[in-house]
Image: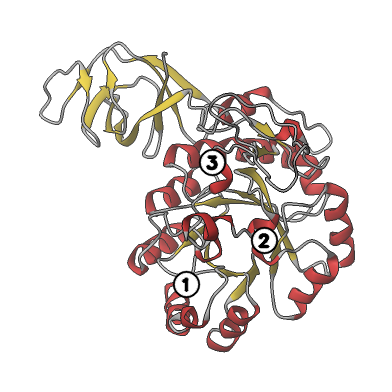
Amino acid sequence: MRNIELLAPAGDLERLKFAIVYGANAVYIGGQIFGLRAAAKNFTLEEMAEGVEFAHKRGAKVFVTANIIPHNEDLEELPDYLRKLQEIGVDAVIVSDPGTMSIVKEIVPDMEIHVSTQANNTNYRTVKFWHDMGAARVVLARELSFAEIKDIRDRIPQELELEAFVHGAMCISYSGRCLLSNYMANRDANRGECAQPCRWNYHIVEEKRPGEYMQVYEDEKGTYIMNSKDLCMIEYIPQLIEAGIDSLKIEGRMKTTFYVATVIRAYRLAIDSYLENPEGWRFKSEWMEELKKSSHRDFTTGFYVDKPGPKDHIYDVVQYVRNYDFIGAVKTYNPETKIATIEQRNRFFKGDTIEILGPQEKIIKMVIDEMWDEEGNDIAVAPHPQQIVRMKIEDYVDEFYLLRKEKIE
């Protein structure tokens, strides 16, 4: 069996570390130029170097996005930027543009190149073309079915890796090539500044087609006619692997640390379970329950099984479902005293019932009986962002373990 990679998004250094601790084999990140998530925090070169060192010490890889659709002025900084990425030890760059690719090959010829989904990779001839141009990996378009992916795999060189999105937000436009944001908000989606107008609230009027009505159910607030459900393929791990996908990619460089850790952990457990016993693999409902504890929309299988229809969109609301709050992260733990030092992320109280999770399968459930501030004073509430709190936890925990509590409406 081929090596199967779980690829995580990382919008900043903290998320990179949590993604790797929770089971990612690789992360994809953006520098402060050339990436398609300009609104993410992204990485300075110094942070990137720290992230690469952290990843490599744990056997993981770091890929850097350079997948904007560049104009002439965008290319001026690229050669120097690429040299710095090579010095840092980045494992690959992700590109979507032939001109960008040619500069990568010229300036850092030993750098591994991955071709972004933005390049509309929907058929085996396109995939093979990129391989012939020097790509080590091609990120497939999201508009492909299992059967189409298997056909591509069978028609391309075996050493060429295929990567595909398996979880996260779905773009309404073909492989993300969208101009709505340009026209409606003067923000270029293909240069990292998408305003996500597909999630906006619309009323439909077409003045030149009187009597022709698009069937839309709406109330006085309008309707979200382009608001796709989120992709979720955790129930289809065998089919993803058997179709020939080498890297299972999670969307979400704009998502939180809690989201990244929770989603990566669930997919890690599912993938490892399959790799241990492919023929006896059974989907566990607990994995889906875990995914639903992170911020999410309703789920869809995208194009993998059938082409999306009305059931794959959300017409009445744009907000995420958030059933749990991320309340803290473990910084240290003393096994002798069983005292954990926690960095607060959302307010919590003495008496709260909480869950604690780490990379392993076991989830700890407990009630906060006592907690203290940094000076050792007994406290009833931790209200301040990033406040340091200490509490007793009977079960062993470690750095990077997360605390969460269910929202009570």
Figure check: 345 above or below 189: above
| Comes first in the chain, label 2 or label 3 | 2
Q: Amino acid at mark 2?
A: Thr
**Mark in the foreground, 2 or 3:** 3
* Image-based side of 246 in relation to 387, left or right: right
Image spot of residue 262 (x, y percent): 51, 35
- Residue 117, labelled with which disc? 2
Q: Name the residue tied to disc 3.
A: 200
User: Residue at (74%, 38%) from the top-left corner?
Assistant: 301
CB within 8 Å, label 1 to label 2: no
User: Residue at (41%, 63%) from the top-left corner?
Assistant: 53
Marks 3 and 1 sit apart, C-alpha to C-alpha, by 40 Å
Quadrant occupied by the C terminus: top left
* Image-based side of 196 in relation to 140, left or right: left
- Within-10-Å neighbours for mark 2: few <14, some 14–19, many 20+: many
**Mark in the foreground, 3 or 1:** 3
Q: Name the residue tied to disc 1.
A: 89
Q: Amino acid at mark 3?
A: Trp
Q: Secondary structure at mark 2?
A: helix
- Within-10-Å neighbours for mark 1: few <14, some 14–19, many 20+: some
